[in-house]
């Protein structure tokens, strides 16, 4: 009888343990270990700034050029525009663009009729860059 009483007591403890037991769930509190506190962004930002070794350069890259620099750049643009226009007129003539392929140094310009008008393809053979232009019909 004593053995059955011991077994009965042991069964009682096992059953009550099983009934009142619960799963232990890890819920992180700290945002650094996976916590989901929506208002902890300032803590994370402060920590990131404390670890940041990057130093921003002090020179201003957006300085306004002087009047002489503007004039020089404008003059260079006008000279290059005039030179390219004269080369274009020399190569093609005074008429409108005609269908064909033209070579200007490392640039290959191909003029062909397209769906919406005249299609101009410009290829830079040294860099591989390519541009398409469509000139609509009147």
Image (cartoon, rainbow, N blue to C red):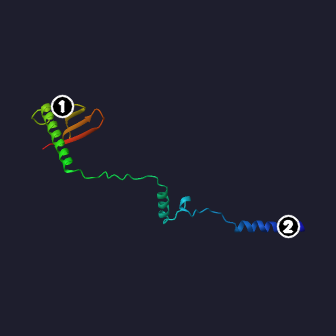
- When asked about the image quadrant of residue 28, the answer is bottom right
Horizontal and vertical percent position of residue 51: 49, 55
Callout 2 secondary element: helix
Camera-side residue of 39 and 134:
39
On-image quarter of the C terminus = top left
Q: Which residue is mark 1?
A: 100
Q: Sequence-wise, which precedes: disc 2 or disc 1? A: 2
Distance between the alpha carbons at the discs numbered 2 and 1: 106 Å
- When asked about the image quadrant of residue 121, the answer is top left
Q: Residue at x 49, y 58 (%)?
A: 50
Q: Is residue 8 left or right of residue 47?
A: right
Q: Which residue is mark 2?
A: 6
Camera-side residue of 52 and 128:
52
Q: Is residue 109 above or below residue 56?
A: above
Camera-side residue of 25 and 136:
25
Callout 1 secondary element: strand
Camera-side residue of 108 and 133:
108
Q: Residue at x 85, y 67 (%)?
A: 6
On-image quarter of the N terminus = bottom right
């Amino acid at each position: 009888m004593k053995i059955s009483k011991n077994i009965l007591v042991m069964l009682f403890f096992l059953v009550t343990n099983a009934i009142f037991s619960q799963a232990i769930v890890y819920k992180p509190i700290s945002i650094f270990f996976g916590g989901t506190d929506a208002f902890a962004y300032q803590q994370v930002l402060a920590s990131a700034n404390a670890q940041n070794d990057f130093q921003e350069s002090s020179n201003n890259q957006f300085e306004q050029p002087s009047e002489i620099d503007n004039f020089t750049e404008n003059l260079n643009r006008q000279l290059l525009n005039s030179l390219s226009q004269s080369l274009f007129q020399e190569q093609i003539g005074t008429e409108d663009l005609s269908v064909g392929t033209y070579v200007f140094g490392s640039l290959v310009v191909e003029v062909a009729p397209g769906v919406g008008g005249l299609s101009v393809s410009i290829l830079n053979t040294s860099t591989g860059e390519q541009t398409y232009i469509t000139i609509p019909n009147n």
